[in-house]
Amino acid sequence: MTKRLISCTASDLAAMDKPHLLEAIAASEGRVLACECIGITPPLLTDVTNAEYAAALSADLLLLNMFDVRQPVIQALPPVPPAETVRELKRLTGRPVGINLEPVDPALAARQDGSLWQMSSGRLATPENARIAAEMGVDMILLTGNPGNGVTNHAIARALCALREAVGSRVILAAGKMHAAGVRGEGGSRILTPADADALMDAGADVILLPAPGTVPGVTLEWAHSLIERVHSRGRLALTAIGTSQEGADPDTIRRIALLCKMAGADIHHIGDTGVPGMALPHNILAYSIAIRGERHTFRRMACSVNR
């Protein structure tokens, strides 16, 4: 029997393939915490990566946003060849690592204004980028959209089909939206309809991402629970996400969101990367973790050596 992820050591996790990792997440019964980090921004601790900081604060999974597989950069990571960037991060943290890829229309990407979310070719959700990510050791690819990038659910489903053929047997494929991502008509409770969720699962998604209740207008506990029940009925996992900068709210707000996600049925709890630029506020990672699994599992994850 596969160990539950919250009980796994670094060596357990390193030995897991895609099916076993999915089983380990499911066996944890809604107590897996994923922390999103940005590697290209200056790290909060200067000479320690944000991903290492998040892992030390009890993150079970690390999700890299703005990660370019063709020009990989993680500030404060020891110098390694580009192809070894992800494996080095996994060695230092002992955690599975995922990345975001975005199915943005190249014509739209070319018109962007140079903001933080400016697209690059190595962040596009293409089969070739997915294959590069898999060779780098990435455990999960999340197809989603950053603010204003115009990523539609239809585009995500179309990209999923291609990525399933390219890497679906090796890498967990997750898909969905944390916010409207600049698309009119796909906001609020229409950010992910039941038909959208079905389309993403038909296209090959192992995990469906949806906004955490209380983070997007109209996204209620009842809405999220109904959608997650649909996802679970098809044998897939659900990831609730805080992608609205509320990772920078007060700890009481974080605890309330965490418990709503637990009640909704989340398998993976995601906390975003812009509490401060690069990751959630450190005390909010702890608040979320303790709310969904208590101090014992939180402190065990923090204390367990990556050499085990």
Image (spheres, helix red, strand yellow):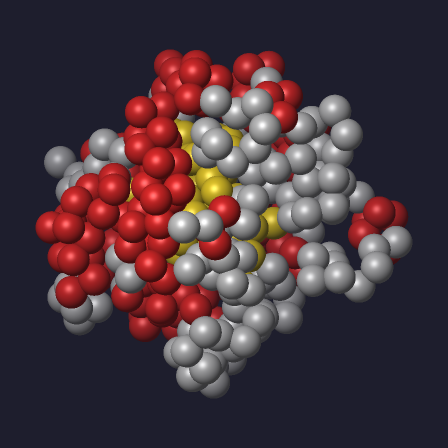
Q: Nearer the viewer, residue 260 or 181?
A: 260
Where's the N terminus, which quadrant? top left
Q: Is residue 128 visible?
A: no
Q: Give percent across and percent down for residue 255.
A: 32, 41
Where's the C terminus, which quadrant? bottom left
Q: Give percent across and percent down for residue 262.
A: 31, 30
Q: Is residue 15 left or right of residue 87?
A: left
Residue at image x 39%, y 73%? 88
Q: Is residue 182 left or right of residue 286?
A: right
Q: Is residue 8 left or right of residue 214?
A: left
Residue at image x 48%, y 42%? 242
Q: Nearer the viewer, residue 105 or 229?
A: 229
Residue at image x 74%, y 24%? 185
Q: Give percent across and percent down for residue 192.
A: 59, 24
Q: Is residue 263 visible?
A: yes
Residue at image x 31%, y 33%? 259
For residue 119, what is the image quadrant? bottom right
Q: Give percent across and percent down for residue 205.
A: 50, 31
For residue 160, what is the image quadrant? top right
Q: Up-down: is 20 above or below 205?
A: below
Q: Nearer the viewer, residue 246 or 89?
A: 246
- How many numbered marks, from 0 up? 0
